[in-house]
């Protein structure tokens, strides 16, 4: 209690002090030097009114110091206790002209939204003021406001508070300010919608999802792109995809894709539309690849097209879909399109700019990944077939890339080797390539951190593979396990080297 007494003594002297900053600095020193458990006894027994009074000063330095001291004191106790004790003060802080004062209250409310969201239900007037701050000119203030409201919307009771008539009126008022603020509200709604099916349902019932969809059809390209980005985020969640499909929104997006292809300005929308359908296909590959022919034709056509941005999105989209078992099967059922795709990617790996080559290598690694439990004869034949269409002698080409002095290309090539290292047909290719086993076990071929880590992932995969001994034999397996146990950054001691040299 000595700390509480000292803090109380200093704060009592604050109104009559000729140097309030010196007093607050003394308080800060006391607070900094005691254990947080000791500070928990301070708040219930000391009045902070004099510090809050300092926040109304015209002296910016004093205001900032006051905010720092209050933050240190309040952060030592539960947010529920803070809200209970300082509800009126926070009301004043949230309408204060100084940003640090607003942030003081928002930080404590943010703590409450994470640690004890129920405590926010007892201060609805503060939550309404938080909604006002979504329209703040400073993102530094608006961002924590959005986080608080999003966290509130992750609980059933919080959803009721968030979609109350008063709150909806407040949010509508904020959205009228400008498009920037409007999209802050949309972002919050999307985050809540992604968090749970009930969050999406309440957002839809309040009309926000339909408003967002309507924005897609406006003439402003930037607005349309932002909307597509947000709808793509909703489509990443299973319940989000089901909802969008049931509401006919997916069909409307495909119609937009047809229009965008013939519209000179529509080209700007195609990457966003492609990403939307790619997210959809990630969870429903069979339905999307079988039902939405405009999407599949566009994405494969774009890999060959002249628009580099669209090409990049198309490659990422196909690899994203093919990263799952169902996605691989859906792509394979498209027939020759995947064969043509793999050949085109192979050409890009050999003849394009570094960024495109790296992207294509990543895509191949994603498409070839196959967990042990998924390694049926059908899927092993599928991945082997895709690999074989990259280019003549694909393994040798990739090994050559892995020996080049470009770390991004080497690391991404190791990603493909890691996929091969878990599949019997891939292990066979490795073992039959003269010198490859020595290469993969030779630590001296890698000097950079990323390269060492990427190569180690190949070793780790080999060490954990149930077929490694059958494919490579016991002696190779023993050396792999030694490398694996030593870790990615093991360096052999000089004395060991000298001893070995001397005995040879």
Image (cartoon, rainbow, N blue to C red):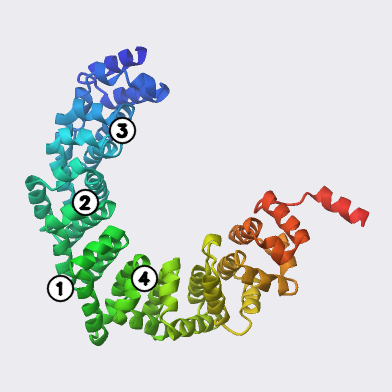
- Residue 94, compared with residue 45, is above or below; it is below
**Placement of the C terminus among the 4 image quadrants:** bottom right
Closer to the camera in the image, 262 or 48: 262
The answer to which image quadrant residue 166 occupies is top left
Q: Secondary structure at mark 4?
A: helix
Q: Are marks 4 and 2 in contact (CB under 8 Å)?
A: no
56 to the left or right of 362? left
Neighbourhood count class around disc 1 (C-alpha, 10 Å): few under 14, some 14–19, many 20 upward: few
Q: Earlier in the sequence, mark 1 or mark 2?
A: 2
Closer to the camera in the image, 414 or 353: 414
Q: Earlier in the sequence, mark 4 or mark 2?
A: 2
Q: Earlier in the sequence, mark 3 or mark 2?
A: 3
Q: Secondary structure at mark 3?
A: helix
3D distance between C-alphas at marks 4 and 1? 29 Å
Q: Secondary structure at mark 2?
A: helix
Residue marked by disc 3: 68
**Placement of the N terminus among the 4 image quadrants:** top left
Q: Residue at x 75, y 71 (%)?
A: 435
């Amino acid at each position: 209690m000595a700390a509480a007494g000292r803090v109380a003594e200093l704060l009592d002297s604050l109104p009559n002090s000729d140097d309030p900053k010196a007093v607050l600095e003394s308080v800060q020193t006391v607070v900094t030097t005691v254990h947080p458990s000791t500070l928990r006894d301070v708040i219930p027994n000391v009045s902070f009114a004099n510090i809050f009074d300092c926040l109304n000063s015209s002296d910016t330095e004093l205001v900032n110091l006051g905010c720092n001291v209050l933050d240190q004191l309040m952060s030592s106790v539960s947010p529920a206790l803070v809200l209970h004790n300082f509800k009126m003060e926070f009301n004043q802080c949230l309408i204060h002209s100084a940003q640090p004062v607003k942030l003081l209250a928002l930080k404590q409310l943010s703590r409450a939204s994470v640690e004890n969201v129920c405590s926010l239900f007892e201060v609805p007037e503060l939550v309404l003021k938080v909604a006002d701050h979504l329209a703040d000119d400073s993102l530094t203030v608006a961002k924590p406001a959005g986080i608080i409201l999003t966290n509130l919307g992750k609980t059933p009771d919080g959803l009721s508070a968030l979609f109350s008539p008063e709150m909806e009126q407040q949010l509508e008022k904020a959205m009228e300010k400008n498009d920037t603020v409007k999209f802050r509200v949309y972002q919050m709604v999307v985050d809540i919608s992604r968090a749970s099916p009930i969050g999406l349902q309440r957002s839809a019932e309040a009309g926000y999802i339909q408003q967002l969809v309507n924005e897609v059809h406006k003439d402003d390209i930037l607005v349309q792109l932002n909307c597509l980005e947000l709808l793509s985020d909703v489509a990443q969640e299973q319940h989000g995809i089901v909802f969008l499909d049931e509401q006919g929104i997916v069909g409307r997006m495909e119609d937009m894709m047809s229009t965008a292809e013939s519209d000179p300005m529509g080209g700007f929308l195609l990457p966003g539309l492609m990403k939307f359908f790619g997210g959809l296909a990630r969870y429903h590959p069979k339905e999307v690849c079988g039902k939405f022919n405009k999407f599949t034709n566009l994405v494969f056509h774009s890999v060959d097209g002249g628009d580099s941005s669209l090409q990049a999105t198309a490659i990422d989209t196909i690899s994203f879909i093919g990263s799952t078992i169902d996605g691989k099967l859906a792509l394979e059922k498209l027939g020759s399109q995947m064969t043509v795709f793999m050949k085109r990617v192979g050409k890009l790996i050999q003849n394009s700019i570094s960024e495109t080559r790296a992207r294509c290598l990543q895509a191949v690694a994603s498409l070839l990944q196959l967990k042990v439990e998924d390694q049926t004869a059908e899927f092993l034949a599928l991945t082997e077939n895709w690999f074989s269409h990259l280019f003549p002698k694909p393994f040798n080409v990739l090994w050559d890339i892995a020996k080049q002095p470009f770390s991004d290309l080497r690391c991404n090539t190791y990603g493909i080797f890691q996929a091969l290292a878990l599949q019997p047909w891939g292990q066979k290719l490795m073992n039959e390539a003269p010198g490859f086993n020595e290469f993969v076990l030779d630590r001296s071929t890698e000097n950079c951190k990323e390269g060492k880590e990427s190569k180690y992932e190949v070793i780790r995969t080999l060490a954990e593979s149930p077929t490694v001994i059958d494919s490579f034999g016991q002696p190779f397996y023993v050396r792999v396990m030694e490398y694996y146990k030593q870790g990615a950054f093991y360096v052999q001691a000089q004395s060991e080297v000298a001893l070995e040299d001397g005995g040879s």
